[in-house]
Amino acid sequence: MAATPLVHPDLDGPRALLAALETTHTALTQHEVAQFQLAVEWATAHPADGLDDAATVEGTEGELAIAGPGAPLVAEFCVADFALAVGMSTDAGRSYLGDAVEVRHRLPRLWARVVAGAVPVWRARRIAAHTRSLPAEGADHVDRHLAPLAHRLSWAQLERTVEAARATFDPIEAEHRRLLAADGRFCDVDTTQVSLDGTMAVRGELDLADALDLDHALTTGAQQLADLGCTEPLDVRRAMAAGALARGDLMLQPETTTEPERPRQKPARRGRELVIYTHLSEGALAGVENTRSQVLVAQVAGWCATATGPVTLRPVLDLTEHLEVPGYTTSPRLREQVLLTHPTCVFPGCCRPSRGCDLDHAIAWADGGPTCSCNLVPLCRFHHRLKTHGGWILQRTGHRIFTWTSPHGRTYTRHT
């Protein structure tokens, strides 16, 4: 295998390389500061008070509070252009723009140190994320106390200072947060992230008694699965038992050792319904869609083996077939085809699942656009509003290729 050529073949020796690294680091820092400053200028150029009266109509452009109280509001549609210009998604761009405005308008001492290159932009953004929920007086308190040492600030010190400011300048919110923290119980299933193996992360903080009962139920269920012939490792069987517990497939309740109780009516089992989509496209033949990712056929076989509800095999759906219906409303078959063809919103950088999006006519229905495979695209609500009311133009330039043109004439391509 040939060696990768050096980026700077003219550099000879460690001294020259270190000097080049220092020069590159300085240039990167300057560029980061310049981008942070330009973000503020972009927000300043798009004030909310520049919106006309039409902005009061539902769906049109409105004002957006991207930073804390007292910071200027911006016209919300300006976020999309900024985000794409700096290579971010709309959500990430909104966060970055908000951090820049927060530091510039509510943390002026920190801003001065960032511009001078004494505090990295990433540190300033971390501080801004903490102060955004404070009233103006609280943000000023944090700025006065932490700006001088922001370059070496520990995050524990940041949190202590922010909470002290909250207790002083917003005691009601501080008490509310204290009560929430006192009861830190939660149970979260991250349905937005599906691994390539078709699994999801589950995490929680339970009451002691509930946690012990759940642990016992999972241990019992794992043993029952082993008794039924399951040869998976214990951790896998415990995970399987959690699903069985949710559906009522196994008797996972802790055994009772006290006196017999009166018979109780067993709750109705919630069987697992399994819907399988079969595609004709070559790339899809190796997997089955579970609405968010592709999973292996072997895993689907396992689901079928343990299914306790109906198993539905949807009719073969050719994603390249052209479907069209009369009228504005899509048919179920056409809708499924569009959603399976484009798993996310088709705006550049947007990853919102298409099943939570609007189905939009790329060429508006009012302008003669048909309700068909080649004219329907999933757009999340914000990007749908951006196209309808924000002056953005969408053109479909390929089966899964879209070209977007901003009101400023810049073009961006999205491959789905």
Image (spheres, grey):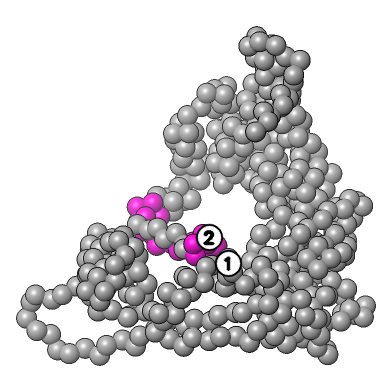
Residue 401 position (above or below residue 34): below
In the displayed structure, would residue 411 be above or below residue 355? above
> What kind of residue is marked 1?
Gln
| Amino acid at circle 2 | Leu
Give how far across and how far down residue 142 sits, in percent.
55, 33
Q: Where is residue 30, by image quadrant?
A: top right
Q: Is residue 191 magenta?
A: yes
Q: Indicate left or right for 16 with 167 as reference.
A: right
Disc 2 + disc 1, Cβ < 8 Å:
yes
Q: Which mark is residue 294?
A: 1
- Given residues 393 and 315, the one toward you in this image is 315
Image side of residue 312 versus residue 182, left or right: right
Q: Is residue 175 magenta?
A: no
Q: Residue at x 81, y 68 (%)?
A: 399
Give the side of residue 288 with respect to residue 38, left or right: left
Name the residue beneath numbered marker 2. Answer: 196
> Quick one: which residue is furthest to the left in this view?
259
Q: Which mark identifies residue 333?
A: none
